[in-house]
Image: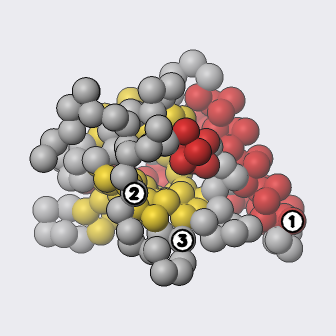
Amino acid sequence: MPRTKSDPPLLDAMHAEFLGGPVAINVASRDEARVPSIARAYGCRVAADRREVVVFLSRRRSTALLRDLAAGAPVAVVFSRPKTHETIQLKGARVRIRPLAAGDRARMLACGAAFATEIIALGYTESFSRALMAPAGDDAMAIAFTPDAVFEQTPGPKAGQRLEPGP
């Protein structure tokens, strides 16, 4: 059943904060033949009311994914913290593709720096870590969506469990 504006947001405050990092963010969809498309995102913004999630992509590195999303395919986004493997998956029926908003480039840089710092502490080289999270530059853009479902995906006994709306 589709969610309405009177329904509580699916993300609670703790999960909304988690999405801001330091996390690896992967975005996936599929084409009409159900062939998957995937791309790395370079940061995230969650609306103050926790109803909309925006992730930042490189247009050049996300061609197939953006094609599938523009055609109306659903989206799945996974946020995973390297240090703990804590992972959350969000699913949405449709996305809105848009240019970066004011402040998004700075947020993207901050998210990338936080992720790089986290994996450097885990033993990855600084050059690898910074290159992995190099911002998308002038080809950066955003996809926005309203989560229809949130899942616990941290490895362990609760992996795959649907998370219900919280306070």
**Element assignment for label 2:** loop
What's the CA distance linking mark 3 and mark 2?
Answer: 12 Å
What's the CA distance linking mark 1 and mark 2?
Answer: 30 Å
- Mark 3 neighbour density, 10 Å: few (under 14) some (14–19) many (20 or more): some
Q: Which residue is mark 2?
A: 163
Up/down of 56 relative to 85, above or below: above
Residue type at the position of mark 3: Thr
**Element assignment for label 3:** loop
* Mark before the other along the chain sequence, 3 or 1: 1
Position of residue 57 measured from the top left corner of the image (x, y, whole percent): 49, 45
**Residue drawn 76% across the image and 49% down it:** 114
Left or right: where does residue 108 sit relative to residue 55? right
In the rendered structure, are the residues bearing label 3 and label 2 in contact, judged by CB atoms less than 8 Å apart? Answer: no
Left or right: where does residue 109 sit relative to residue 136? right
**Looking at the image, can residue 135 be seen?**
no
Toward the bottom, the furthest residue is 157
Q: Which residue is mark 3?
A: 154
Residue type at the position of mark 2: Leu
Left or right: where does residue 37 sit relative to residue 44? left
Quadrant in which residue 32 is drawn: bottom left
Q: Which residue is mark 1?
A: 121
For this rendering, which residue is in front, 128 or 154?
A: 154
Quadrant in which residue 24 is drawn: bottom right
Up/down of 4 relative to 56, above or below: above
Q: Nearer the viewer, mark 3 or mark 2?
A: 2
* Mark before the other along the chain sequence, 3 or 2: 3
What's the CA distance linking mark 3 and mark 1?
Answer: 20 Å
For this rendering, which residue is in front, 156 or 47?
A: 156
